[in-house]
Amino acid sequence: MYKRKDTFYTKAKQEGYRSRAAYKLLELGGAEKVVARGDFVVDAGAAPGGWSQVLLRLVGKKGKVAAVDILPMDPLPGENFRFFLRDVTDPALPAEIVAFLGRRADAVVSDAAPNTTGIPFTDQARSADLVRAVLSLAGQTLRQGGTFLAKIFEGAEAEDVVRELRASFGEVRRIRPAATRKESFELYLLARKYRGN
Ligand SMILES: C[S@@+](CC[C@H](N)C(=O)[O-])C[C@H]1O[C@@H](n2cnc3c(N)ncnc32)[C@H](O)[C@@H]1O
C-alpha cells in the first residue's frame, strides 16, 4: 500500500498542478531536456492534465501542446493548447493533430496507462501494447530527429519494446524518475533522434 497523500501529492495541490505525475515530467523535462522552448508536443494519455500544464510552461507561448485522452479533462488556457477526446488508436487522430500543430511534433510524450488487472503478465502486456499504439501515433505525427517518451510497466515485454524503439530511434534509455513511487513497477522509455518514416 502506498500513502495516497504523499509529499508529491501535497506539493502538487499547493503548486496548482492537477497531478503528482507532473513532477515526473518536471524532473525529466529539466534533467533530460525532453522538450525545449518553442517545441510542438503531443501529450498522450493527458487527463487530468498535470503533464499538459508542465509542457505548456516548458514550451512557452511559441510552443504548442496537443493533448489526447479517452477521459475528458478540464480545459487549459491558450490558443497553443488543444485537447482531443480520443483513443490514441483513433485512425483520424494523427491528421487532426498535425493540422492543429501546423507541422509534425518535436516530441511525443505518453503517461498513458492501461486499466490494470493485478495480474502482472496481463498488465505488462497491456502497457506494452499501449506504448506500441502511441509509437504508431508518433509514426504519423513525430518529425525526423524528434523525441519519444513513454511510461511502461517493467518486464520482458518492456524489453521487447526497447528493441522495437531501437529500430526507429538513434538513442533509447530507461529512466525511473525520483517522483515515481518506490513500490511502482513503472519506468519511462526515452528515445531520441527519430529516424522518420
Ligand atoms: C496516469 S494518467 C495520466 C496523468 C497525466 N499525465 C497527468 O499528469 O495528469 C493515464 C491516462 O491514460 C489514459 N489512457 C489510457 N488508455 C488510453 C488510450 N488508449 N487512449 C487515450 N488515453 C488513454 C487514461 O484515460 C488516463 O487518463
Image (cartoon, rainbow, N blue to C red):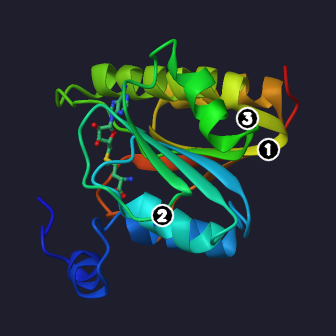
Any part of residue 32 in sight: yes
Tell me residue 25's x, y (percent): 51, 64
Label 3 belongs to which residue? 142
| Side (left or right) of 130 relative to 138 | left
Crowd rating for badge 3 (residues with CA inside 10 Å; few <14, some 14–19, many 20+)? many
Residue 101, quarter of picture: top right
Q: Nearer the viewer, mark 2 or mark 3?
A: 2
- Left or right of 97 on screen, residue 54: left
Residue type marked 1: Gly
> Residue at horizontal 63%, vertical 70%?
61
* Real-space CA distance between mark 1 and mark 3, rounded to the nearest whole angstrom: 6 Å
Figure quadrant of residue 161: top right
Question: Residue at 32% across / 64% down in the picture?
Answer: 181
**Which residue is rendered at x = 54% and y = 63% of the image?**
55
The label number, if any, that marks residue 78 in the structure image: 2
| CA distance separating discs 2 and 1 | 24 Å
Q: Amino acid at mark 2?
A: Gly
Q: Secondary structure at mark 1?
A: strand
Quadrant where ligand 1 appears: top left
The residue that disc 1 covers is 146
Give the SS element for disc 2. Answer: loop
